[in-house]
Image (cartoon, rainbow, N blue to C red):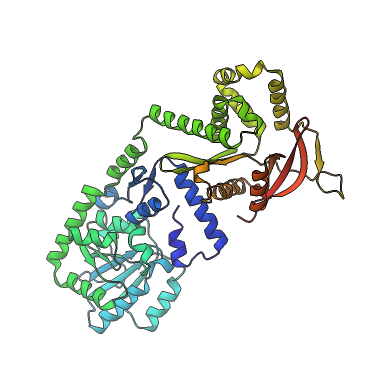
Amino acid sequence: MWPELPKAMGVITNPLVLGAMGVLEWLSYRSARRLVGLSPGIVDGIARRGVARERIALIPNGCDLDIFGAPSAHWRPAGVGAEDLMAVFTGTHGIANGLDAVLDAAAELKRRGRGDIKLVLIGDGKLKPALQARAQADGLDNLVFHPPVGKGQLAGLMAATDVGLQILANVPAFYYGTSPNKFFDYLAAGLPVLNNYPGWLAEIIARHQCGFAVPPDDPVAFAAALCQAADDPAERLRMGARARQLAAAEYDRALLAGRFVAWLEGADKRQMDAIRQADYQRVAQLHAQNIDQGFLSTLGPRFLSLLYQAIDEFPDACLLLARDGERVVGFVAGTLNMGQVYRHLLRHWLALGLSLAPSLLVPWRLWRMVEILRYSRGESGRVRALDTESAEVPPLPAAELLSIAVDPACQGRGIAADLYAGLKIFFATRGQGAFKIIVGAPLAPAHRFYRRMGAVPVAEIEVHRGAASTVYVQQVGDV
């Protein structure tokens, strides 16, 4: 998740969509135990969301040394001579790519009379027709457009290329927030790279002397770098060799894949199981502290821990966690079918039996457990409409928010609202247009919260005989 780029580019401007993306990003980061950023800017962005840096690893895109190191038939597009310096851009011709910079450089090269330098754009995209029209209008015969090619054919093209073009629009969020595949393909092919914006890739090029880093929106510097490459072929070849060495030493896909696996498996299975169990225990603690008037809290922390484990494991249920560093400070739970969750809970029958043993000896608790099971199977008939003009109970959604709680020390930060929004997104992805919430009459703060979130009271229900609860319905279509 990285919504900062489409926002910075102006591609997505709808505040509701951006808000939903921000909530999903926040929940994803806070719920994950380990995270991977493809660039330094992405790592910094995750950390700014309150995630401890020790939980984040920088693992960029990598170099496919097998494809670009294997022998291949060299080829050049029509219009490029064998003695020309050929600089190639491969990829999408879109807004983010800023390919007008290449046309500006082509115009500058034409002004200098450098017909020995050809610029080749391989690929397709929304802006390609406009770029072709401009090139024709400006008489840029030193610019060649070519359709997309497969990786095998691309390897042959790269083998005949002199300079790889790493081009992006001048958007500050790109400087440290992108990890373009083409950059690493150029390195793997042993090409010097011309990069036209500042940031971490420009720093790599400068540090390893494997290409040219020019300022953005500067066609004179762009053209000068290409002239330097054409006029000093020996240094150009040395740059290419350094690029290939860098690819093998630091960005080989096999190396990065091993680093990725090592990061994810840095804790062994027993350690990860222990972390997950600690999370469930913490959720149970938050439930007992914040929903102390509910019946489930009387069944004890061990039962609550098992219940939330079952919710987390069940495919049509959702347990979202909010963290402050490593500590869980909030959660929300929901499901499309609570009866199925309880059946899933029976997989842990031994631990479940031990956790409930004391309650099974108390008749009123046993009866309330039966009532909950009946409700989860849709057998509770004590429901009445709140609409005084109609005695008919409106159809209630199958999806249900089960519980939500935030550590009192962290309340007031908007955590509950973000969790709530995250659950709406979960239900929306499951094709649910609405979900219900059952709230006990004495829980005044909960009633205020759900009304503030936009939930509407539609009915009254007795899950437990003699104890009325309000049924709220929340639409999810506005996420």
Q: Is residue 456 above or below residue 287?
A: below
Residue positioned most to the left: 234
Where residue 455 appears, x then y in whole percent? 68, 50
Quarter of the picture containing the C terminus is bottom right
| Residue 374 occupies quadrant | top right
Quadrant in the picture for residue 344 = top right
Residue 42 percent across, percent down from the top left: 37, 54
Identify whether 167 is placed above or below 459.
Answer: below
Residue at point 56% right, 30% down? Answer: 310
**How many numbered markers are drawn?**
0
Q: Nearer the viewer, residue 341 or 363?
A: 363
Q: Percent position (x, y) of residue 103?
A: 34, 76
Q: What residue is drawn where x is 33% and y is 43%?
A: 54
Position of residue 315 measured from the top left corner of the image (x, y, whole percent) = 57, 36
The answer to whether 152 is drawn above or below residue 378 in the figure is below
Q: Is residue 196 visible?
A: yes
Give the camera-side residue of 407 and 142: 407
Where residue 238 sits, quadrant-wise, is bottom left
Question: At 61% from the left edge and 16% from the top edge, which residue is drawn?
Answer: 357
Left or right placement of residue 387 versus residue 260 in this view? right
Q: Is residue 93 visible from the viewing direction of this image?
A: no
Decide if residue 378 is on the left or right side of residue 99.
Answer: right
In the image, what residue occupies the spot 33% across and 80% down? 140
